[in-house]
Amino acid sequence: MSAAIVNTLLEKTAGFSIEETLAFLADEYKGKVIFSTSFGQEDQVITALIAKNELPISIFTLDTGRLFQETYDVFHRTVKKYKVAIQTYFPEASAVENLLNTKGPNSFYESVENRKECCFIRKVAPLTKALKGNEIWITGLRAEQSENRNDLKAFEYDAHFNIIKFNPLLKWTLEDVQKYIDENNVPQNALHKKGFVSIGCAPCTRAISEGEDIRAGRWSWESSHKECGLHQK
C-alpha cells in the first residue's frame, strides 16, 4: 500500500515545482503534513517557501538540549521574520537524567552504540512523538549530503516511522541552496560562514576543511555512516 501511495505521488507531482508540490500536499493531506527543521541551510529554504506561500503545513523542531547558541539565534530570527509557529519537542527529562546518571555527560564519545543511544533519547524518541498522526513528513535532505542519501527519491516510504517522506531539495546542490538564501534574504545560521556545513548538537559537530566530505564534521571521532537515526538512509 505504501509503495502504491509513493508511486501515485510521484506521478501526480511529475513536472510540478517545489512550491506546487508543497501546495498540492497541503491540500491533499489537510492537517497531516509536517515539516521538521533543524535550522540548517536546507531547512531554512523550505521554511521560507512555506511561509512565502502561506501554506497550512506544520513546522516543528527538536531541541536536544545541546544545541549551539547560533542555532537558537537563527530560530529566533526565523520566527520573527516569517511570523510562523514552530513547535518544539524536547527529550523526556527522565531519560536524559538516567543517561547522565548512569553513563555521564560525554558517553557518546566512548562508542558508536553510546552515541546512538544519546541520539535516540534526544532526537529519535521526540521525533516519533512529533510525527504521530501525520501522513507526510517534509525534510531538507539532499542527495549529495552523504552516500547513504544519494539513492533517495523525492517521495519515500519511511517504514521505521510509518510515514511518507517528501524530500523537495533532493537534487539541489549546496550552491543552489546558498543562492536561494542570498537572493531571498533568508536567515542563516552564522556557523555556516565558519565552515560548519551540517550542524547538529554542539559536542558532535565541527567545521570542515576544504575538500572534506560534507558529513565529516558530524561525529568526527568515529567511523560510521554518520547518521543519528532520524533518517534511515
Image (cartoon, rainbow, N blue to C red):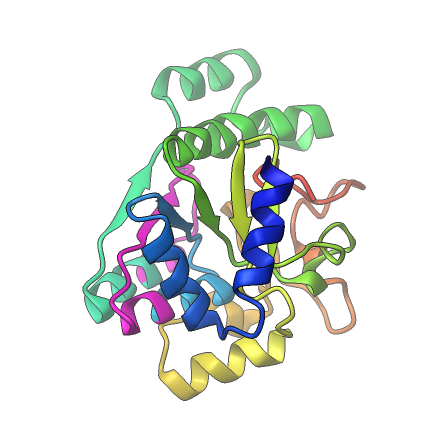
The quarter of the displayed image where residue 118 is located: top right
The residue positioned 50% from the left and 65% from the top of the image is 42
Residue 6 percent across, percent down from the top left: 59, 48
- Can residue 189 be seen by looking at this rendering? no
Residue 55 percent across, percent down from the top left: 28, 63
Question: In which quadrant is the C terminus drawn?
Answer: top right
Q: In this view, does 209 lie to the left or right of 194?
A: right
In the rendered image, residue 63 lying in the magenta stretch gets the answer yes
The residue positioned 64% from the left and 74% from the top of the image is 173
Q: Is residue 206 left or right of residue 49?
A: right
In the rendered image, residue 21 lying in the magenta stretch gets the answer no
The quarter of the displayed image where residue 32 is located: top left
The quarter of the displayed image where residue 216 is located: bottom right
Farthest residue to the bottom: give it: 183
Task: Judge by depth and name the residue closer to the eye, 118 or 107.
Answer: 118
Task: Judge by depth and name the residue closer to the eye, 10 or 148.
Answer: 10
Please give the range of residues in magenta: 49-73
- Can residue 193 be seen by looking at this rendering? yes
Residue 18 percent across, percent down from the top left: 48, 71
Residue 21 percent across, percent down from the top left: 45, 65
